[in-house]
Image (spheres, rainbow, N blue to C red):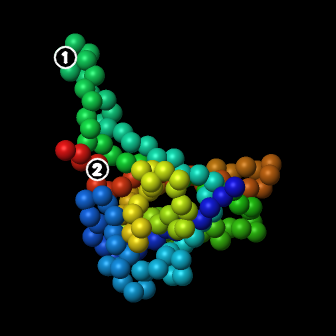
Amino acid sequence: MSWTIALLGTNTLYLPDSLSEVSLASMDAAHDDPATDAAWKKFEVSGIHRIRGGFDGIKEATGGIAIHNKNQKRTFKIIFMPHLFPSETDISEALDSVFNYNHLYFFKMDYTFSTPTYKIHSDNKCLKVAGLITGEDEFPTGSKRYEATIQTIKPILEG
């Protein structure tokens, strides 16, 4: 089972709110509709795992007592569907292209989460993220698998 996400790599900065979200309406007309805009590259993924973690891991106080910090960073691990080499190298090229820009934006497309608290971003918005991508060749099957790790650019600050 898979679903589609969209990633936009651009040299244009769209200012995010405190949740690292950018209103699609505030983007240039050329980029305000991830479903139809060709600059938003669409990818099939098998899963996205959300990870919350401390800025520098778990800190310890004198005596080895762990200190919890409610202010955390929000990271997502994206598992892309494998694709065949060489017939589907356009997918590799599109992924490489997206990550070669100064600014990266993520849009979940039309996936609906059954648990509203888990949703990745608000409706009619996308996330401003920082990210990196890794790939692994599976030579016996002639396929390539990619994973990306993206992190919201602003931390989760809870009062």
Residue 104 in view: no
Q: Nearer the viewer, residue 83 or 121?
A: 121
Count of residue discs: 2
- Residue position marked by numbered label 2 in the rendering: 155
Q: Which residue is drawn at 73% across and 49% down?
A: 138
Q: In this view, does 35 lie to the left or right of 124?
A: right
Question: For the N terminus, which image quadrant?
Answer: bottom right
Question: For the C terminus, which image quadrant?
Answer: top left
Q: Disc 2 residue type?
A: Pro
* Disc 1: CA contacts within 10 A as few (<14), some (14-19) or many (>=20): few
Q: Which residue is drawn at 28% across and 22% down?
A: 66
Residue 135: percent from the left, percent from the top? Answer: 60, 53
Q: Earlier in the sequence, mark 1 or mark 2?
A: 1
Residue 10 in view: yes
Q: Disc 1 residue type?
A: Thr
Q: Is residue 9 above or below residue 55?
A: below
Q: Which of 91 and 25 is in front in this view?
A: 25
In the picture, the disc for residue 51 is none
SS category of the residue bearing label 2: loop
Q: Which residue is drawn at 52% across and 56% down?
A: 113
Q: Nearer the viewer, residue 145 or 53?
A: 53
- Residue position marked by numbered label 1 in the rendering: 62
